[in-house]
Image (spheres, rainbow, N blue to C red):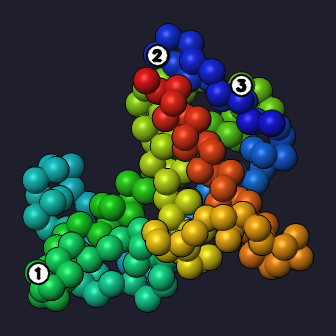
């Protein structure tokens, strides 16, 4: 069973082997989804300002996939033109940031095997963001709404095809909560 504990500013997490495998597979799926439909960069520059100014080849319309729409929302709900322009300059960086976080967690899981993982403060934030992205993705696939009565979800029958997915959603919520609690 997953266990978190604090050691000064470090958070130590340990997973059962099957838990680490499940989390790693979820992260791989997230990385694949985030890369889906992302065109390759057209420019590469060592100068960050030049890269920012020349990196304007991003998409201008929202993704078709509902999960990507949730992870990469419109910046201006009432202004399609402003939202498209904002997306053109920011979506690639947002996707890359989410992929970086997911890969950082995945790398830690793969390197540790069944051993404990010591998370330094900067790693803790990557983990928190990646867990949040996974939870948003699963919650979107389940069509969970803010106003939903969670007791209804908790009472799903064992043979309901959504049950296992909801259990993953709930477990990710536990991981987020436990990590956040130990980050204090």
Of the pair 137 and 109, the residue shown nearer to us: 137
Of marks 1 and 3, which one's residue comes earlier in the chain? 1
Q: Is mark 3 on a helix, strand or loop?
A: loop
Residue wearing tag 1: 82
Q: Is mark 1 on a helix, strand or loop?
A: helix
Name the residue rendered at 57%, 69% in the picture: 149
* Disc 1 packing (10 Å; few <14; some 14–19; many ≥20): some
Is residue 9 among what the camera can see? yes
Instruction: Locate residue 54 relative to residue 154 in the image: left or right.
Output: left
Task: State which quarter of the image contains the N terminus.
Answer: top right
* Disc 3 packing (10 Å; few <14; some 14–19; many ≥20): some
Task: State which quarter of the image contains the C terminus.
Answer: top left
Instruction: Locate residue 168 relative to residue 30 in the image: left or right.
Output: right
Disc on res. 9: 2
Is residue 33 among what the camera can see? no
Of the pair 12 and 44, the residue shown nearer to us: 12
Instruction: Locate residue 106 relative to residue 114 in the image: left or right.
Output: left
Q: How far apart are marks 1 and 3 (CA)?
A: 46 Å
Q: Distance between the residues labelled 1 and 2?
A: 41 Å
Query: At which x and y percent is residue 150?
Result: 61, 64
Name the residue rendered at 69%, 34% in the picture: 111
Name the residue rendered at 70%, 41% in the picture: 110
Name the residue rendered at 46%, 16% in the picture: 9
Query: At which x and y percent is residue 95?
Result: 39, 64
Residue wearing tag 3: 116
Query: At which x and y percent is residue 16?
Result: 82, 37
């Amino acid at each position: 069973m997953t266990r978190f504990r604090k050691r000064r500013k470090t958070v130590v997490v340990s997973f059962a082997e099957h838990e680490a495998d499940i989390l790693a597979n979820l992260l791989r799926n997230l990385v694949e989804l985030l890369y889906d439909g992302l065109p390759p960069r057209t420019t590469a520059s060592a100068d960050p300002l030049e890269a920012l100014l020349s990196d304007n080849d991003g998409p201008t319309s929202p993704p078709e996939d509902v999960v990507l729409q949730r992870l990469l929302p419109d910046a201006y709900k009432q202004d399609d033109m402003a939202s498209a322009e904002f997306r053109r300059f920011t979506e690639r960086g947002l996707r890359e940031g989410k992929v970086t976080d997911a890969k950082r967690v995945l790398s830690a899981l793969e390197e540790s095997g069944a051993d404990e993982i010591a998370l330094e403060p900067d790693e803790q934030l990557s983990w928190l963001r990646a867990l949040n992205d996974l939870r948003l993705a699963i919650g979107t696939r389940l069509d969970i709404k803010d106003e939903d009565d969670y007791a209804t979800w908790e009472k799903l029958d064992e043979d309901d095809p959504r049950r296992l997915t909801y259990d993953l959603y709930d477990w990710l919520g536990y991981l987020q909560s436990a990590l956040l609690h130990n980050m204090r």
